[in-house]
Image (tube, helix red, strand yellow):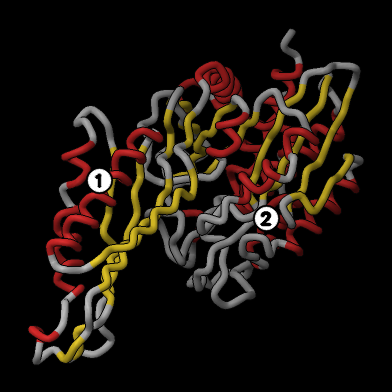
Amino acid sequence: MNIVDSFADISRFVALRRDIHAHPELGFEEHRTSELVAGLLREWGLEVHTGIAGTGVVGVLRCGTGRRTIGLRADLDALPLQEENRFAHRSVHDGRMHACGHDGHTTMLLAAAWHLAQARDVDGTVHFIFQPAEEMGKAGALKMIQDGLFERFPCEAVFALHNFPIGNTGGFALNHGALMASSNTWRVTVTGRGTHASLPHTGIDPVGAVVDLAQQLQGLVARVIPSTERALLAVTQLQGSDAPNVIPDTAAVGGTVRTFSVEATDKLEEGLRRLAAGIAQAHGCTAEVMFRRASPPVVNHAAEAAFAAQVMREVVGPAMVDEDFPAVMGAEDFAHMLRVRPGCYAFIGNGDGSHRMPDHGPGPCIIHNTSFDFNDAIIPIGASYFVRLAQQWLARP
C-alpha cells in the first residue's frame, strides 16, 4: 500500500494542525505546543526528551538491531503578526499567528512519527526533532546544537521540509547546493553634534552622513561581489531626529544582507564597514557598525539531496519534483544543522490559496502574510516523505 494511502483518514491530523494554528506561541515560548507534541509522542510509545534549548522536543524511535540513524526536523514557533483570517481556527492570541506554516510542519512530522510507531518497519533509530525559535533570528537550531542535540541524539543525516508557493500543490522543490540565503542584519549609528536646525553651522550633522551612506550602499554589491554570484544588501531603516527643527547628535541607517556563501557575507561586511568609516569621517562624524549574522546559507549536501529527490519521486511521481529549483533569498536556521551534519532541506507546494475559501478565495498564499494558512491537503504527502526517508535511509547497507 502506498504510504500516502495510509493517511486516508487525516481528520485527526487536520484537527491537530488547526489546534496548533489557533494557539500560536513565539520563539522559546512554545510551552503548550511542546507539551502537546511530547504528550502525543509518549502516547505512541516513543522515547521523549524535552527541554532541549528550552522548549525543544526530541522523540526517539528505536526498532530492530540496526545501527543507522536519521534526524527529521520540524519547527514549532509562530510570528508576531495580527491574523486577519476569519475561519474557526484563527489565532486566539492577538498579535501572534502561524503565518509561516510551522503548525503544518509540526503536524506532518507528528503524522510520520505516528505511522512509524505503529508500523515499526524500520531497522535503526529515527530522531524526530521539534525545534523552537526558528523565526526572528532567534537561532533555535543553533541553540539545540549547543545544548548537545547531536551528541545526545546521533544523526547520520538530517532532513527538513518547508511549505512554499512553488506551483504544484504537494509537489517538491530542492537543489543540490545552496537553496536559501544567509540572514544578516546591520545598523550604522553615526554620531555628530546636535544643534537647532536653523543654526547648522554650530553643529555637526549626522543625518547628511547617513543619507550619503544609504545612497552609497545601494551600489556596494556590484562593487564587491562577482556578477556570477547572487547577493543582496537592502537599506530598510533610516532614523534621524524626532523633531523637524532639531539636528540630532546621532542618526542611523540599517537593513539586511543576504548571500549564498560566507565569503560573500565577509566581503559585504568589510565593504559596509569601510564605507561607514570613510563617509562618517568626510562629514566630520564617527560611525559605529553593528553587523549580526543570524544564520548562514542553507546549503544542501549533494548525496543527501539526490537521495531525498529519489524518495520524493516515489511519493508523488517525477513530474511533481523539481530537483533544480533556484535558490531563494529567504533564510532558515536549519542551515546551522546542515553545517554540522549532512542532509537536505526542501520545499513542499502549499497551493494557490484556494484552500482558504470562503475567507479569501484563490490567490497567492505567501508565508509571513497576515492571511496565510497552511494547506491541510499536503499533510499526508509531507508525512509520507518523512516516512519513506526513514525507511529507506535505515535500510541502506
Which residue is depicted at the point 50% across and 19% down?
A: 302
The C terminus: image quadrant: top right
- Say whether marks 1 and 2 touch (CB < 8 Å): no
Q: Which mark is residue 271?
A: 1
390 displayed left or right of 199: right
Q: Which residue is mark 2?
A: 17
Q: Quadrant of residue 323?
A: top left
Which residue is depicted at the point 39% across and 30% down?
A: 325
264 displayed left or right of 89: left
Badge 1 crowding class, 10 Å Cα cut-off, few under 14, some 14 to 19, many 20 or more, is: some
The N terminus: image quadrant: top right
Residue 9 seen in render? no
Closer to us: 278 or 319: 278
Helix, strand or loop at label 2? It is: helix
Which residue is depicted at the point 49% across and 45% down?
A: 295
Which residue is depicted at the point 14% across and 63% down?
A: 212
**Spot occupied by residue 29 in the image (x, y as percentages of width and height):** 68, 64
328 displayed left or right of 42: left
Residue type pointed to by label 1: Gly
**Spot occupied by residue 241 in the image (x, y as percentages of width and height):** 25, 83
Closer to us: 226 or 303: 226
